[in-house]
Image (cartoon, grey):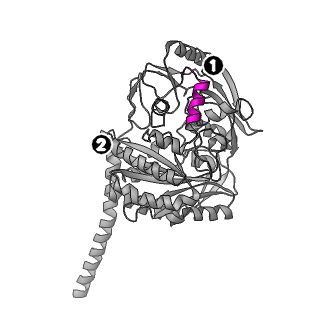
């Protein structure tokens, strides 16, 4: 009788322990899901902002580009001439996902290119002719009809072509330079309102300046982009030591040269901070390529787990455990290239009006990556910031853009922070940013320019020694400074 009673108590104790192990994370995630507010877009037409939500600015006028090509050319040319006559500055916007006022000038004219989004594919030459306002979430389904895909883009589809070229973006495409390498030519409406064709052989200096030129040299009207085939990829993921990431990545690429997409994610949970990484790879495999369709990718669950890690040590530890556990679930699964690229930032973006998500990115030569990771481990915990995510991307030497960040093969460290919307939090973020820029420069690296304007002018010139000449050429091609933004206002004067 006593044995049975003891056994029952033991079983009951086991069930209680298992219940506690399951109930806490489930309750935590349900609470996170319920309290996660819906996104808000309530801004007056004369007040604009960007992805930082910290640049709410009153502008003189918002002008939406016409959809039809010839009418858009006339409209934009006339607008430039009017701006020159009145002394007003023009800033150019697409999806407005930059974070330092790069698409905004106080009291200026904001030219919204989103509606100028036509697409025409030459499937024989694998070239897409596309209006600069087109978003990747419009382009990917269009290309999918023809069995094609984007060659180089960001890891999400929420950005415009013109914006992506203006920041010279890069993504999960390994052994590849930034998007500038896929631009065959573009048409630019310059500071005189003239339409110019720019390529590596025609107006070549201006071409290099516009690629990663942040809209300072004119309006990118349309672009001819090299595209690639949409193929089936098999997923393979590995948990590795973060200090060994580059070695593991290079060994994998050497053995699997048909890897089409690859990136890493470093753990940011307090337990063993930045000691591990998950290397995610997608290798070309055989099989019929299915047409793009909406799959159940558990977006709500993934979002809840991710947002639950904001300002929560428990949430961060839970998330890393779940991400490591999911490695075996993803291994061997197949996806089309377009499926992997066709996801928007809204799956993970902040919607809490008291906070905002802030991006940093640092480009580190591959030999210095372990040292940079070690520096991050010791530096970030000293600052009052909430780190949500670090991904690692391989970027090859950029030979096309004037203001380039990849002077050699580098690994980009993309960091996402959750920041309170307050002066104190902004000051803390500025202090950390300047420290991390100093570290990256000491390692012969650079930082990415589309984010908060926290770098000093001295740091900008050290990371981008060609910046002074870049600004001089800006004044050569645009002597009246018709095109401007907050980035130029801060660093060019």
Is 476 part of what is drawn in magenta? Answer: yes
Q: Name the residue under label 2.
A: 424
Residue 477 image offset from top left, x and y in percent? 61, 25
Q: Is residue 347 found left or right of 476 in the rendered image?
A: left
Q: Residue 288's mark?
A: none
Residue 16 image offset from top left, x and y in percent? 28, 70
Instruction: Determine whether 426 is above or below 32 in the image.
Output: above
**Residue 160 in view (yes/no):** no
Q: Name the residue under label 1.
A: 73
Instruction: Determine whether 64 is above or below 467 in the image.
Output: above
Q: Give the Cα separation between the discs numbered 1 and 2.
A: 45 Å
Please give the range of residues in magenta: 468-483
Q: How crowded is mark 2: few (under 14 residues within 10 Å), some or many (20 or more)?
A: few
Instruction: Determine whether 275 is above or below 310 in the image.
Output: below
Residue 306 image offset from top left, x and y in percent? 41, 52
| Residue drawn at the location 64% of the way across and 45% of the way down | 398
């Amino acid at each position: 009788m006593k044995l049975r009673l003891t056994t029952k108590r033991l079983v009951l104790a086991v069930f209680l322990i298992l219940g506690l192990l399951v109930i806490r994370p489930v309750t935590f995630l349900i609470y996170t899901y319920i309290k996660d507010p819906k996104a808000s877009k309530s801004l007056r037409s004369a007040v604009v902002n960007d992805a930082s939500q910290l640049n709410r600015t009153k502008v003189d006028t918002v002008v939406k580009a016409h959809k039809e090509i010839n009418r858009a050319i006339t409209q934009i040319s006339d607008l430039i001439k009017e701006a020159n006559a009145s002394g007003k500055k023009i800033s150019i916007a697409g999806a407005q996902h930059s974070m330092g006022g790069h698409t905004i000038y106080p009291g200026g004219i904001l030219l919204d290119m989103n509606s100028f989004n036509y697409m025409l594919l030459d499937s024989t030459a694998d070239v897409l002719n596309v209006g600069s306002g087109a978003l990747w979430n419009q382009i990917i389904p269009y290309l999918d009809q023809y069995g094609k895909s984007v060659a180089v883009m960001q890891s999400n589809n929420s950005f415009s072509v013109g914006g992506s070229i203006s920041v010279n973006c890069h993504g999960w495409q390994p052994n590849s330079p930034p998007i500038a390498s896929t631009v065959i030519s573009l048409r630019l409406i310059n500071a005189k309102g003239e339409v110019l064709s720019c390529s590596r052989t025609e107006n070549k200096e201006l071409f290099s300046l516009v690629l990663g030129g942040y809209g300072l040299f004119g309006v990118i009207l349309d672009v001819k982009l090299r595209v690639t085939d949409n193929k089936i990829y098999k997923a393979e993921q590995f948990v590795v030591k973060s200090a060994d990431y580059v070695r593991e990545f290079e060994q994998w690429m050497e053995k699997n040269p048909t890897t089409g997409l690859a990136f890493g994610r470093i753990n940011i949970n307090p337990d063993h901070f930045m000691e591990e990484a998950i290397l995610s790879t997608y290798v070309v495999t055989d099989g019929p390529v299915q047409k793009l369709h909406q799959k159940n990718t558990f977006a709500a669950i993934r979002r809840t787990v991710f947002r639950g890690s904001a300002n929560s040590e428990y949430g961060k530890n839970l998330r890393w455990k779940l991400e490591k556990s999911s490695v075996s679930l993803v291994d061997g699964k197949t996806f089309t290239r377009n499926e992997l690229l066709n996801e928007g930032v809204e799956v993970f973006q902040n919607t809490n009006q008291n906070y905002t998500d802030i991006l940093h990115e640092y480009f580190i030569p591959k030999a210095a990556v372990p040292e940079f990771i070690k520096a991050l481990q010791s530096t970030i915990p000293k600052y009052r910031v909430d780190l949500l995510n670090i991904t690692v991307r391989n970027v090859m030497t950029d030979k096309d853009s004037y203001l380039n960040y990849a002077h050699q093969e580098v690994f980009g460290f993309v960091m996402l922070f959750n920041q309170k919307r307050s002066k104190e939090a902004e000051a803390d973020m500025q202090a950390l940013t300047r420290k991390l820029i100093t570290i990256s420069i000491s390692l012969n690296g650079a930082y990415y320019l589309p984010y908060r304007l926290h770098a000093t002018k001295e740091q900008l010139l050290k990371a981008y020694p060609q910046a002074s000449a870049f600004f001089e050429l800006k004044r050569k091609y645009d002597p009246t400074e018709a095109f401007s933004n907050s980035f130029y206002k801060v660093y060019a004067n």
